[in-house]
Image (cartoon, grey):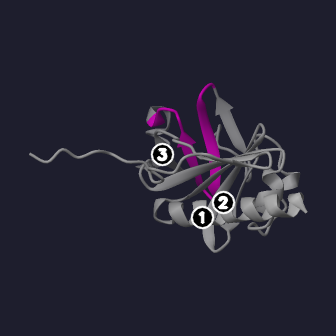
Amino acid sequence: MVNLIAKTPLWGHTPIALAGVTLAELDLGQVTSVAPFGAVQGFPAPNCVLACGDARLVWAGRGQAFLIGGSPAAWADKAALTDQGDAWACLSVTGAGAVDVLARLVPIDLRTMGSGGCARSCLGHMAAIFIAVSGGFEVMVPRSMAKTAWHEVEAAMRMRSARLLC
């Protein structure tokens, strides 16, 4: 019998720390897309994250949010729910220079985003969701683009690090 082993999108990639910035894979656990049937209370405004304990409801676009780390049961009769757990990868970019690293790849100014904010934009040529957290950002990309996103962020980290050495 074949023994299947579940692997994360960035399996085998170990965290990288350069010039005060750390890049690591973040396992978000259960991720559920929540698309309300109409106007409902408790749905995040654009570019906002609502948190309750370990659960977060992250705005992901017009009429859509991602429930991360919580049970979708409360939304069952108010919204269309789809499991997104295996569809997305998440990179953690933290440290004092995290915003400088991402500025090389992202067309929006992430410095204006405080903890609890989020934005849907692109990382290089890839669609991404940026979530501001204490000390940096969580960057969600489609699972199929996880290794490319890792490569792009790592390259930006190396360029920044080299520039700081000059």
Quickly name the residue at label 1: 151
Looking at the image, which is closer to me, 18 or 44? 18
Q: Is residue 59 left or right of residue 80?
A: right
Quickly name the residue at label 2: 154
Q: Is residue 37 visible?
A: no
Q: Residues within 10 Å of mark 3 (few under 14, many from 20)?
A: many
Q: Are marks 1 and 2 in contact (CB under 8 Å)?
A: yes
Query: Which of the 4 quarters of the picture holds residue 149?
Result: bottom right
**Nearer mark to the viewer, of 2 and 3:** 2
Q: Residue furthest left?
A: 1
Q: Is residue 7 left or right of residue 106?
A: left
- How many numbered markers are drawn? 3
SS at badge 1: helix
Q: Are marks 3 and 1 in contact (CB under 8 Å)?
A: no
Measure the C-alpha gap from mark 1 to mark 2: 5 Å
- Residue occupying the point 68% across, 65% down: 155
Where does the magenta region start and end? 53-72
- Residue occupying the point 23% across, 46% down: 4
Q: Residue furthest top?
A: 53
Please provide percent x and percent y for residue 112. 88, 53
Q: Could you say which disc has been placed on residue 32 in the image?
A: 3
Looking at the image, which is closer to me, 97 or 60? 97
Helix, strand or loop: magenta stretch: strand
> What residue type is disc 2 on?
Glu
SS at badge 2: helix
Residue 57 counted in the magenta span: yes
Query: Which of the 4 quarters of the picture holds residue 95?
Result: top right
Please provide percent x and percent y for residue 100. 83, 57
> What residue type is disc 3 on?
Thr
